[in-house]
Image (cartoon, rainbow, N blue to C red):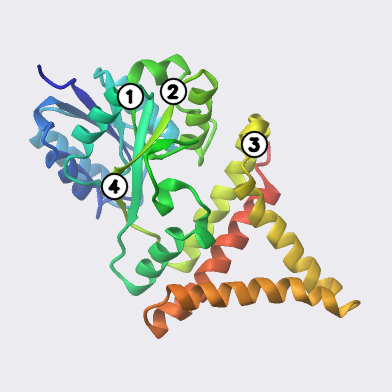
Amino acid sequence: MKEPKVAVVIPAKNAEKTLEKAFISVLNQKTYEQIEICIAVAPSEDSTLDVAKKIELNHENVTLVENPSGKTPTGLNLAIKNTQAPVVVRLDAHAELEEKYVSTALETLKKTGAANVGGRQNPVGTTPFEKAVGVAISSRFGAGDARFRTGGKAGEVDTVYLGVFERSAIENVGLFDESLVRNQDAELNWRLRETGEKIWFEPELVASYKPRSTLKELAKQYYEYGKWRRHVVGTHPRSIKLRQLVPPLNALVFFLGLVLGFFWMPLFGFPALYIAGTVCVTTAKSKTAKNFLYLLIIFPTMHFSWAAGFLKGVKN
């Protein structure tokens, strides 16, 4: 019996250096002959569109659509609507699937009855800074205890990295929310779970991910994460997790401690405690002096950028 046909959907923006690698990772899947691929290209500052056109020209099972909105959830929905397969694999243009990813996902969908299965995000940096970011986002101190970041045993979770979906399930809830810029995956998984569907984490599913290359890019990324998480919480209040309250509470306590400490010195203890904790974790995670210095900056950048975005929220 043949495996079900699979649709791989790839939103792409400013990805001229990584899109082809993402595509090749799909070619390396054992189920390639049963896969259709749709790339949704957003307006880019590089030659992403040219790369996508070349891929489409050389592979008959590839379709290219343009995504003038530039937003990831819109691109995902365009790609999904331009494919037919009953199983949808969500892939980013800056990520790569490990071999057997698709076949393992199909087995897991069948075994668990889940609507969406996903696995571990494996940050793969090429520069010392990117490698340090990879260490930070894979640690509980850096990005919380989500299993897709830190690993763990297979089982039901609230969300996963990327994801392999039953088309019928995501069509039933209306696909991705196109009003969002970030957090579209967690928001979709929330709606799936609200209808009684399961989201399943399978540690054998691994997809690599290219971390941000500069501190400015990282700060912007985490600011956007926090801002759009606040928006999702406003729409779905019960979706909030305790781990998501830690960064904004920490930021408020940190800066209040700095200011009010001048009036009552013991309050300086709160920012001092955070700094000491950061130094301890950085020391434990660092392999070189350069790595230590990077992490000493990266951890607070992630924490306070996410907190600033969450506290500010999205202006309507």
Q: Is residue 308 left or right of residue 93?
A: right
User: Disc 1 or 3, which lies upstream in sequence?
Assistant: 1
Q: Amino acid at mark 4?
A: Ala
User: Disc 2 or 4, which lies upstream in sequence?
Assistant: 2
Query: Considering depth in this image, is 206 or 312 the residue closer to the camera?
Result: 206
In the rendered image, is residue 19 in sight?
yes
Q: How many marks?
A: 4
Q: Estimate how packed mark 3 is, as few (under 14), some (14 to 19) or many (20 or more) residues with alpha carbons within 10 Å.
A: some
User: Disc 3 or 4, which lies upstream in sequence?
Assistant: 4
Residue underneath mark 3: 233
Which residue appears at 35% of the width and 52% of the height?
Answer: 45
Q: CA gap, disc 2 to disc 4?
A: 22 Å
Query: Considering depth in this image, is 51 or 62 the residue closer to the camera?
Result: 62
Residue underneath mark 2: 175
Which residue appears at 43% of the width and 67% of the height?
Answer: 214
> Mark 2 against mark 4, which lies toward the viewer?
4
Q: Is residue 131 above or below residue 9?
A: below
Q: Describe the element under mark 2 as helix, strand or loop.
A: loop
Contact, mark 1 vs mark 2 (Cβ under 8 Å)? yes
Q: Amino acid at mark 1?
A: Ile
Q: Is residue 297 left or right of residue 131?
A: right
Residue underneath mark 4: 207
Q: Is residue 282 above or below residue 314?
A: below
Residue lying at the far front in this picture: please name it.
Answer: 153
Which residue appears at 53% of the width and 55% of the height?
Answer: 222
